[in-house]
Image (cartoon, coloured by chain):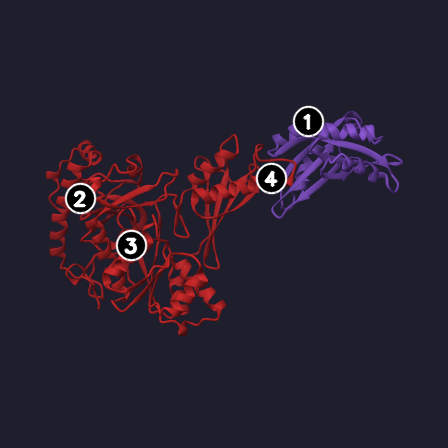
Amino acid sequence: MQYWNPTYECMHREEMTRVQTARLIDTVKRVYHNVPYYREKMQKAGIEPGDINSLEDLKKLPFTYKQDLRDTYPYGLFAAPLSEIVRIHASSGTTGKQTVVGYTRKDIDTWAEVAARTLVSAGADRNSFIQVAYGYGLFTGGLGIHYGAERLGASVIPISGGNTKRQIQIMKDFGTTVLACTPSYALYMAEEMEEMGIKKEDLKLKAGVFGAEPWSENMRKEIEERFGILAIDIYGLSEVIGPGVATECPCKCGLHIQEDHFIPEIIDPVTEEVLPEGSKGELVFTTVTKEGLPLLRYRTRDISSLTYEKCECGRTSVRMSKVSGRSDDMLIIRGVNVFPSQVESVLLEFGETAPHYLMIVDRIDNLDVLEIWVEVNQAMFSDQVKRIEDVENKIRKAIEVTLGINAKVKLVEPKTIERNEGKAKRVIDKRKI
Amino acid sequence: MLVKQISVFLENKSGRLAEVTKVLADNNINISALSIADTTDFGILRIIVNNPDKAEKVLKDNDFAVSSTEVIAIAVPDQPGGLEKALRVLNEESIGIEYMYAFVGKTEDEALVILRVEALEEAADKLVKNGVKVLSADNVYKL
């Protein structure tokens, strides 16, 4: 099986434009009539649903920012009645407030469809055993791939994240053929596997779908060699739907966007102008089939570029280049979104003045590690070692609770963290991806 | 009876201690006792100086994290069992010692020791009552 849904994945450009246009017009109408927040936004911009008649008109629509989701927390942007919502997912936010997404039954169906296309493009079929090692829960990673695998008729192994030894044992004993997890976790597994004395020949693994964090071609090569598999990059974000928004095919030349559901644009993040094909800029999505949380021109903050050239694999869908960075200060550490302001909010509780800190992210043995340097202030300092270590521990625990990942906390002398005019340098990312 | 001790936060990297002593020297402050508690990542320098208030101020002005705590300074006979007598008193009164260290300089036949305990006043009282020589702040700063 080469494609899951060739009708859409290999559709002619004119036909795709026709489909997208009809769906866009319908979405704009629905959003305008069902979501007061969007209606107001559009009225402020002087736009009515009747003004949107073609894909060209897309650029007239106002952008949606993550902040809009926070401002309308939790359900303010939902376009379907809450009685129609069958699922809620959420992703972490800067101030502890999460970004909430709601799915109708049809949205879940759409999600399964796009996730199935993703898995098929990695070579999976109904005979596959798919080990889903993304986390299950509010995070969309686990359940998204799960639905895709079920839609495909494959056998799902819903193991979720963690417990690496068990993951490997199950991979071997159950005959897993497709692994789904973050790329850094895959490499971590490879090392653990070596320690356990299990060789890649002992496994039936053929492919892996890896995403939720940036990774490099070198990492891909290493994963492919150590497991003897095809490793493909997948892209998704919960606001848009979750995993399944875009996926590589075995050509590994960009990620095919499921554009019958999500229309992409590339814009200049500063001027907000739409950029021509091939230019690098911020990726923006308009969802055109979602009912629960349709989004107009959602600013992903991910830096990428688009190409409409037909792919060797036969798919005609637009491809996005591997995400090469972020247009804001958000960090993705071990697949978790981390904002410096979260660290700031924790530290504010430990001193009387604005905290000075530096987050140092590195990748050691293929796992992301976060170290946070905190300048000691009078409130933290004591003449006794145990008191200071106590403060360090309290900060570490509070950060773990707030960020959802653990970090090493190191106290440093006052005024030793570099200060720049205006914006303080809060992050050093040493990861070589 | 209590003596002011100045503590300074030091990162474990070269040149930090020298920076503290330079600030003190530049301000004509004399150190009469010191100790360093060290962990993997940081150290705490504790010093007794001739002018603790000034030392605290100049160190803070130079961006060090500084705290001022009260400690007890005792003089014990410079002979076997000298320190033992003082510590026995505290032990009998169930007063725990957080840390202690000895003076750099000392008088002819006495050793001078700094004690950091939780129940400061009580500890000083018991020591005096049991015949241990507790030094006054003024005497210590002059050393």
Closer to the camera: disc 3 or disc 1?
3
Quadrant that contains the C terminus of chain A: bottom left
Q: CA distance from mark 3 to mark 2?
A: 28 Å
Observer-nearest residue: B73 or A307?
Answer: B73
Residue A388: assigned label: 4
- Residue A37 at x, y percent in the picture: 22, 34
**Residue A88 visible at all:** yes
Question: Crowding at label 1, few (<14), some or many (≥20) Cα neighbours within 10 Å?
Answer: some
**Residue B4 visible at all:** no
Residue B54: assigned label: 1
Question: Crowding at label 4, few (<14), some or many (≥20) Cα neighbours within 10 Å?
Answer: some
- Residue B58 at x, y percent in the picture: 65, 29
Give the colour chain B carries in the figure: purple
Q: CA distance from mark 2 to mark 4?
A: 56 Å
Dots 2, 4 in contact, CB < 8 A? no
The chain letter of the red chain reads A
Observer-nearest residue: A33 or B59?
Answer: A33
Query: Label 2 marks which chain's residue?
Result: A
Q: CA distance from mark 3 to mark 4?
A: 44 Å
Q: Judge if badges 3 and 2 mark residues of a common chain.
A: yes
Residue A58: assigned label: 2
With A399 as the anchor, is A238 left or right in this view? left
Q: How many marks?
A: 4
Residue A123: assigned label: none
Residue drawn 42% across the image and 68% down it: A226
Query: Label 3 marks which chain's residue?
Result: A
- Residue A163 at x, y percent in the picture: 44, 59
Q: Is residue A101 above or below residue A111?
A: above
- Please tell me whether mark 2 sits on a helix, a strand or a loop: helix
Dots 3, 2 in contact, CB < 8 A? no
